[in-house]
Amino acid sequence: DVQLQASGGGSVQAGGSLKLSCTASGLSFDDYAIGWFREAPGKKREGVGCISNHDGGARYYDLAKGRFTISSDNDKKIVYLQLNNLKPEDTARYYCAAEQKWCSRNQSMYKYWGRGTQVTVSS
């Protein structure tokens, strides 16, 4: 069975940093891309970025550019999301998800989802 477990969330003040982890089991990073998404109360789920061995690295949505970084440890099957210079509007539940091979902006393409980890940023 494929499982994705996001961890590392917490409460920080504005300007702080967090490093989220997505630990995968039951799949290979050679076959799957891992995407990060977030959902705030009352808002639509939005994409943060994605990483795939087939795409030559990480790709980011505009909200993440310049502040967030995605990396992976293929041996440990962990994808990281480094969150820097956090703002109150970054408060959300962050999810990782897997889709086959390539990063897509279409969330419906992601077949497997983890349960997420909460990030709360206070001003």
Image (cartoon, grey):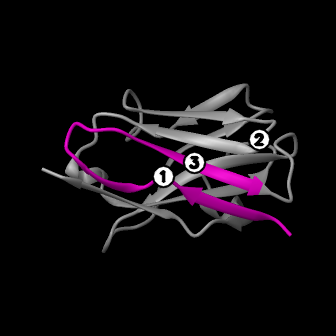
From the image, tell me which residue sits under label 1: 8
Q: Which residue is mark 2?
A: 76
Q: Position of residue 61 (x, y in %)?
A: 47, 40
**Amino acid found under the numbered disc labelled 1:** Gly
Q: Which residues are magenta?
A: 1-24
Q: Amino acid at mark 2?
A: Lys
Which picture quadrant has residue 55?
top right
Few, some or many C-alpha atoms within 10 Å of disc 3 (few <14, some 14-19, many ≥20)?
A: many
> For numbered disc 2, what is the local secondary structure?
loop
Q: Is residue 41 above or below residue 96?
A: below
Label 3 and label 1: CA atoms lie apart by 6 Å
Of the 4 image quadrants, the one containing the N terminus is bottom right
Query: In the shown orientation, is residue 86 left or right of residue 81?
Result: left
Give the spatial CA distance, label 3 vs label 2: 11 Å
The answer to whether mark 3 and mark 1 are in CB contact below 8 A is yes
The residue to which callout 3 is attached is: 21
The image position of residue 19, as x and y in percent, is 46, 41
Residue 99 painted magenta: no
Q: Considering only order in the chain, which callout, 1 or 2, is on the residue closer to the N terminus?
A: 1
